[in-house]
Amino acid sequence: MISNQHSPSKFVFIHANKTGGNCINSALENYGYKYPNDNGFCHKDISFPHSQHWTYEELSKVVNLKEYTTFSICRNPWSRMVSYYRKNVCNPISVAHVDIEFNDWVKMAFVDKETPEYIPRVDKRYSHKGSQYCREHDGVRNIDECYYYMKDNNGFISVDYVIEFSNLSNNFNNLMGKLGIEVVIPELPHMRSNVKTHNGKFFKINTYHDMYNSESVDIINDAFINDITLFGYTYE
């Protein structure tokens, strides 16, 4: 999201997938553009069309980020990938859909790298919106580290503020206070263990730990080593 000229303080929100960013976008819908690509912020070198998930590097091509307050959200990768699996992989109408159990999917996604995220495609659902939506792209960022979204082209985290998902409301409210913006973040939706996923799968779990075996714990540890190191996450 890029703030518009009516915002009390100019900001850019870098939305890493499955970090509660939709709630942030909803809270700030009157202050900026959730979809920069639809509002004149385009660049020939950005192939990923879904601009609500553009990275720091991509957003730096369409605005001078030094003129904005920038922020993003990080999340424990073990928890985040369970959320992604239940919301996207288990959804038969999602481009990420694979009919596979969780621990097998972790290996398929992060060791074999054979899940749909790695397949280049044009998203024909949106190609009518203009040439910027007709570019071939993959969806690897959807299962990449939060670090991937926040780093600059030198590999350094360059956002001004990183909000931790487990304390999202408090940290977001504090940041909005600094920016002079009065908004209330909506309550985060939770896919509870007593709610079936899109194709009828039922997960009787109390915590994300219930989804993992020892092999998949280690696979996530290796795949998300930057997030784990930079933000101090552990599986426990």
Image (cartoon, rainbow, N blue to C red):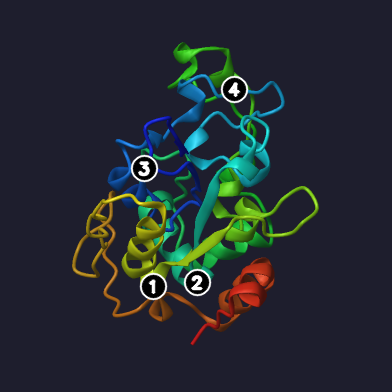
Task: Count residues near mark 3 (Cα–Cα under 10 Å), then give few for <14, some for 14-19, many for 20+.
Answer: few
Q: Is residue 71 left or right of residue 28?
A: right
Disc 4 to disc 1, C-alpha distance: 33 Å
Q: Amino acid at mark 4?
A: Cys
Classify mark 4: helix, strand or loop: loop
Task: Count residues near mark 1 (Cα–Cα under 10 Å), then give few for <14, some for 14-19, many for 20+.
Answer: some
Q: Is residue 38 above or below residue 139?
A: above
**Residue 108 image position (x, y, % from top left):** 61, 58
Contact between labelled residues 3 and 1, with CB atoms less than 8 Å apart: no
Q: Amino acid at mark 2?
A: Asn
Residue carrying label 4: 42
Q: Amino acid at mark 1?
A: Ser
Q: Is residue 10 above or below residue 123?
A: below
Contact between labelled residues 1 and 4, with CB atoms less than 8 Å apart: no
Disc 1 to disc 3, C-alpha distance: 29 Å
Residue carrying label 3: 92
Contact between labelled residues 2 and 1, with CB atoms less than 8 Å apart: yes
Q: Is residue 41 above or below residue 26?
A: above
Residue carrying label 1: 166
The image quarter containing residue 128 is top left
Disc 1 to disc 2, C-alpha distance: 9 Å
Contact between labelled residues 2 and 4, with CB atoms less than 8 Å apart: no
Classify mark 3: helix, strand or loop: loop
Q: Is residue 198 above or below residue 40?
A: below
Between circles 4 and 2, the one closer to the viewer is: 4
Residue nearer the viewer, 128 or 45: 45
Residue carrying label 2: 76
Q: Amino acid at mark 3?
A: Pro
Which of disc 3 and disc 1 is earlier in sequence? 3
Task: Count residues near mark 2 (Cα–Cα under 10 Å), then give few for <14, some for 14-19, many for 20+.
Answer: many
Which of disc 3 and disc 4 is earlier in sequence? 4
Task: Count residues near mark 4 (Cα–Cα under 10 Å), then give few for <14, some for 14-19, many for 20+.
Answer: some
